[in-house]
Amino acid sequence: MISRKLEEYINLSQKKVEEHLEKILAERSPEIIYQAMRYSVFAGGKRLRPLLCLLSYQMLSKDQEVDQKILDIASAIELIHTYSLIHDDLPAMDNDVLRRGKPTNHVVFGEAIAILAGDALLNLAAEVCMDWILRYGCEKNLVKAAKYLFWASGVEGMIGGQVIDITNSGQDIKSEELLFEMHLKKTSRLIQASCVCGALVAGAEDDVVYDMEEFGKNLGLAFQIRDDILDVIGDSKKVGKSIGKDIKEKKNTFVTFYGLEKAQQLVEHYSQKAIDVIQKYDNSELLIELTNYLINREK
């Protein structure tokens, strides 16, 4: 259960992000690629990363108004996240046929169009960021935010994590350190970037940006470990994707490495570390409540 205040905030934020994404993804030619892009972007996700970006911004910003300046980067983050899901689901990667309760992109549009749709979303995110930087006069913090976002999406982030996952799939991962590196890069980095970008747009100083980086890193780990747990005990109808697939395919998860009990302890450990970082800030109550909600979620 979440408070009415957080529920209202989530609903309002999702509405604003949806409207902004609609503007960015207005259908053009060739129609098929925009249909494929829109299919995955508007498939009903939680919009967690944009939400974290907005909450981080509003916690640290003086005016706290959600305007185009913050919605641009929040939307770019969601475009990148969606591109990564399309590519993750491909037969050459995780070979998933269900995502967010619907057939995956390649099942509907074919592999070639799905690959191009993912590529197009990543390029569109870069275009949104470049337009954003130019619109606001190349402010230093905006340039830093865009750079951080694409760093978190690249070899030091999502792509690097996916490479570790693929090259160790079907065999026991060599070390605890490699398991953490994989999930820090594959999942935590973009969550981390969402919080950092929100802080940078708010004009935060370096020490505050570092705090948001630490918060996002620890929240990202707790989120991923909970995701691994749900793959074992979750309901596919609630989770919106195939259940038990990680174990069947001998994926390296926190549950397969540590077992359920230890994995749950790690969720609690990293979520508390995240909360400890931000509880000194005014207006942090919604971020703290969201953290507690995410680690107890059923989907």
Image: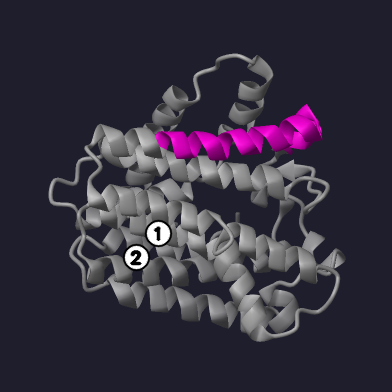
| Numbered badge on residue 193 | none
**127 magenta-colored:** yes
The picture quadrant where one finds residue 235 is bottom right
The picture quadrant where one finds residue 165 is bottom right
For the residue carrying disc 1, how many other residues have a C-alpha within 10 Å: few (<14), some (14-19), or many (20+)?
some
Q: In this view, does 110 lie above or below 205?
A: above
Q: What element carries label 1?
A: helix
User: What secondary structure do most residues of the magenta stretch adopt?
Assistant: helix
Q: What stretch is highlighted in magenta?
A: 104-128
Q: Mark 1 points at which residue?
A: 290
Q: As drawn, is 44 to the left or to the right of 251?
A: left
Q: In this view, does 9 lie above or below 285?
A: above
Residue 270: x %, y % from top left: 47, 77
**Three-letter code for the amino acid on which mark 2 is drawn:** Ile
- Looking at the image, do the residues carrying marks 1 and 2 touch, with CB atoms under 8 Å apart? yes
Q: Quadrant of the N terminus?
A: bottom left
Q: Name the residue under label 2.
A: 288
